[in-house]
């Protein structure tokens, strides 16, 4: 069994025998799992889209942004010859964390809209709230375990 921890902005697509994990606050993670082939992926995006500070046309998709994370999923589906309706999709995160409250809600809206636009069927969701979430996604079974924690400590002195 291979355990892989995803940091913000990271993406991974793998097969059975892999457990993908991440820690979420205002960020959002989307998991996709193909039950027949036991393959799937996890993205951990930080922002719903690019602002004026970020170039709109990147040479390579940047997993920090929702649209780019879905482009990475699209590449893997094309590589594996699979289609969105064959996957179980789940979305997590988007918790209000201090000043990121508006970003958290925008991340959730972007993730849900992209799932729908790309033709994925949502099997589960655990979004919003105020606490952090620790996820573990087992590609052998498609199960995603969520452990909730308190607010993330950002090391900000009051």
Image (cartoon, grey):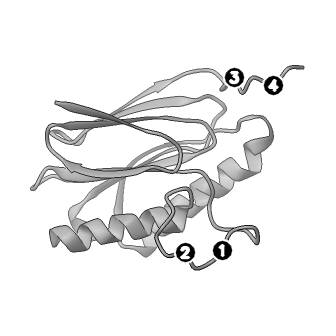
**Distance from Cα at disc 1 to Cα at disc 4:** 30 Å
> How many neighbours does mark 3 have within 10 angstroms: few (below 14), some (14-19), or many (20 or more)?
few
**Distance from Cα at disc 3 to Cα at disc 1:** 31 Å
**Of callouts 4 and 2, which one flags the residue occurring earlier in the amino acid sequence?**
2
Which one is nearer the viewer's eye here, 125 or 12?
A: 12
Asked which quadrant contains residue 57, the reply is bottom right
Q: Residue 58's mark?
A: 2
Against 83, residue 27 (above or below) is above
Front label number (1 vs 4): 1
Front label number (2 vs 3): 2
Q: Are the residues tagged 1 and 2 within 8 Å (C-beta)? A: yes
Q: Is residue 7 left or right of residue 128?
A: left
Q: Is residue 109 left or right of residue 139?
A: right
Tag 3 residue? 153
Tag 4 residue? 156
Tag 1 residue? 55
* Image quarter hosting the N terminus: top left
Q: Residue furthest right?
A: 158
Q: Position of residue 116 (x, y in %)?
A: 44, 69
Which secondary structure lies at badge 1? loop
> How many neighbours does mark 2 have within 10 angstroms: few (below 14), some (14-19), or many (20 or more)?
few
């Amino acid at each position: 069994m291979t355990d892989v921890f995803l940091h913000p902005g990271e993406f991974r697509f793998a097969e059975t025998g892999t457990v993908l994990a991440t820690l979420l606050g205002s960020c959002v993670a989307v998991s996709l799992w193909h039950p027949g082939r036991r393959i799937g992926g996890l993205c951990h995006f930080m922002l719903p889209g690019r602002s004026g500070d970020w170039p709109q046309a990147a040479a390579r998709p940047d997993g920090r942004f929702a649209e780019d994370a879905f482009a990475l999923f699209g590449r893997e589906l094309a590589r594996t010859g699979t289609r969105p309706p064959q996957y179980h999709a789940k979305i997590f995160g988007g918790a209000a964390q201090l000043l990121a409250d508006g970003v958290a809600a925008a991340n959730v809206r972007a993730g849900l809209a992209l799932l729908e636009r790309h033709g994925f069927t949502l099997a589960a969701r655990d979004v919003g709230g105020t606490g952090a979430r620790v996820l573990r996604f087992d590609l052998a079974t498609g199960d995603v375990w969520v452990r909730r924690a308190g607010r993330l400590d950002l090391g900000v002195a009051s």
